């Protein structure tokens, strides 16, 4: 029994996402050294949980949404650079709809704005999928075009201006609480769990992995890659649209230049940190969730430590590069060889 537990523990430690967990713990320890009460959670007058930990969970929600969709796209050996632009398009659509509505504070209007935003985002993702699956354009080129076109579409929708609107039900989507926790994080967590269950408790996950490993062999095995490719790009855009609603509803305004800006890079980093192979095939939804939490924790730590905005990208890059190096099979093999040499040398010295 002890040997089985030891083997399970070793297998868990060898998981790529464990380095992400270790990095999160290390960042939190750094913050605790500066402020011992950093992780303290209190209850506000309205009965909601507040604190730095809650802020990290709230910040992680949009990244988690994008990372889940990005994970499935990358598993097919693709990439989706358009998620940030789809975020701003969905935000622009929802804000313009609410701004022009005479009953913006009604639940029905808020749900209509949400549905319209998600529908437009999904359509853009479906276009990506069709271009990749049927026209056979490279995913990088296809989504790069949509990344550039998306912000142009948002500017057309808003007339080139930042748009603000007022809607209490819509604002609740990003700022509300359920059982004391931010609804935005609970919503993102539930969707991530549902997607993970669907792809891992059915043959869908294996089919997606097979496309990433060898699309011709998967086709010969009876799998239809085209339909799956359209599905994963549509799902990626759908989840990006949800993230866009989160980002927009939190301030009830859309900035056509800044909303979703470079969020695709954070999502890709989260996916890589979680152990998903950029070459396609292997993927981990749970690992991407860890990566999203790490990115949010890192962003919060940068602000908390007072790192200047000009040095922030370099600081994040150093942390990510170190983490990716620790995940590298070659680096880990070098460490293993070094440990074996040290152990051999110790035994020789003991025998002498």
Image (cartoon, rainbow, N blue to C red):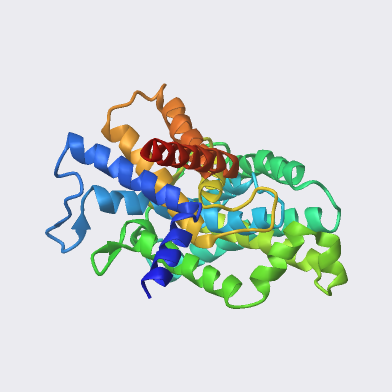
Depth check: give the residue in front, 77 or 230: 77
Q: Is residue 252 visible?
A: no
Q: Residue at x 55, y 50 (%)?
A: 271
Q: Position of residue 337 (x, y in %)?
A: 53, 40
Q: Quadrant of residue 146?
A: top right
Q: Position of residue 192 (x, y in %)?
A: 49, 65
Q: Quadrant of residue 174?
A: bottom left
Q: Is residue 177 above or below residue 35?
A: below
Q: Residue at x 59, y 56 (%)?
A: 71
Q: Is residue 224 above or below residue 146?
A: below
In the rendered image, the residue lying farthest to the left is: 45
Q: Position of residue 106 (x, y in %)?
A: 38, 68
Q: How many circles with numbers are drawn on the protein?
A: 0
Depth check: give the residue in front, 186 or 270: 270
In the rendered image, the residue lying farthest to the bottom is: 202
Picture quarter with the C terminus = top left
Picture quarter with the N terminus = bottom left
Q: Is residue 46 above or below residue 154?
A: below
Q: Residue at x 82, y 48 (%)?
A: 137
Depth check: give the residue in front, 310 or 40: 40
Q: Position of residue 328 (x, y in %)?
A: 56, 42
The reply, left or right, for residue 251 in relation to residue 268 is: left
Q: Residue at x 44, y 66 (%)?
A: 8
Depth check: give the residue in front, 120 or 280: 280
Q: Is residue 231 visible?
A: yes
């Amino acid at each position: 029994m002890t040997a089985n537990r030891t083997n399970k523990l070793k297998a868990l430690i060898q998981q790529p996402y464990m380095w992400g967990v270790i990095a999160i713990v290390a960042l939190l320890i750094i913050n605790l050294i500066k402020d011992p009460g950093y992780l303290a959670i209190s209850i506000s007058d309205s009965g909601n949980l507040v604190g730095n930990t809650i802020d990290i969970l709230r910040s992680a929600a949009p990244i988690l949404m994008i990372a889940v969709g990005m994970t499935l796209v990358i598993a097919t050996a693709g990439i989706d650079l358009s998620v940030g632009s789809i975020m701003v398009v969905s935000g622009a659509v929802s804000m313009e709809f609410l701004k022009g509505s005479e009953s913006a504070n009604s639940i029905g209007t808020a749900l209509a704005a949400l549905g319209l935003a998600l529908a437009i985002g999904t359509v853009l993702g479906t276009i990506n999928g069709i271009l990749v699956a049927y026209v056979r354009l490279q995913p990088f080129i296809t989504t790069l075009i949509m990344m550039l076109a998306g912000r142009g579409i948002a500017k057309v929708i808003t007339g080139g201006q930042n748009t603000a609107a007022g809607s209490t039900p819509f604002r609740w989507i990003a700022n509300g609480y359920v059982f004391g926790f931010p609804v935005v994080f609970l919503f993102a967590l539930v969707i991530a769990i549902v997607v993970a269950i669907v792809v891992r408790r059915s043959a869908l996950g294996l089919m997606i992995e097979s496309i990433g490993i060898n699309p011709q062999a998967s086709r010969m095995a009876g799998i239809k890659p085209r339909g799956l490719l359209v599905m994963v790009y549509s799902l990626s855009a759908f989840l990006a649209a949800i993230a866009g609603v989160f980002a927009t509803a939190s301030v009830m305004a859309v900035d056509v230049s800044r909303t979703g800006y470079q969020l695709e890079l954070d999502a890709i980093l989260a996916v890589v940190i979680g152990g998903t192979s950029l070459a396609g095939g292997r993927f981990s939804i749970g690992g991407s969730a860890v990566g999203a939490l790490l990115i949010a924790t890192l962003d919060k730590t940068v602000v908390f430590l007072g790192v200047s905005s000009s040095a922030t990208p370099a600081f994040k890059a150093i942390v990510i590069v170190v983490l990716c190096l620790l995940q590298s099979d070659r680096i880990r093999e070098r460490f293993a060889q070094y440990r074996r040499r040290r152990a051999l040398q110790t035994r020789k010295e003991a025998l002498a």
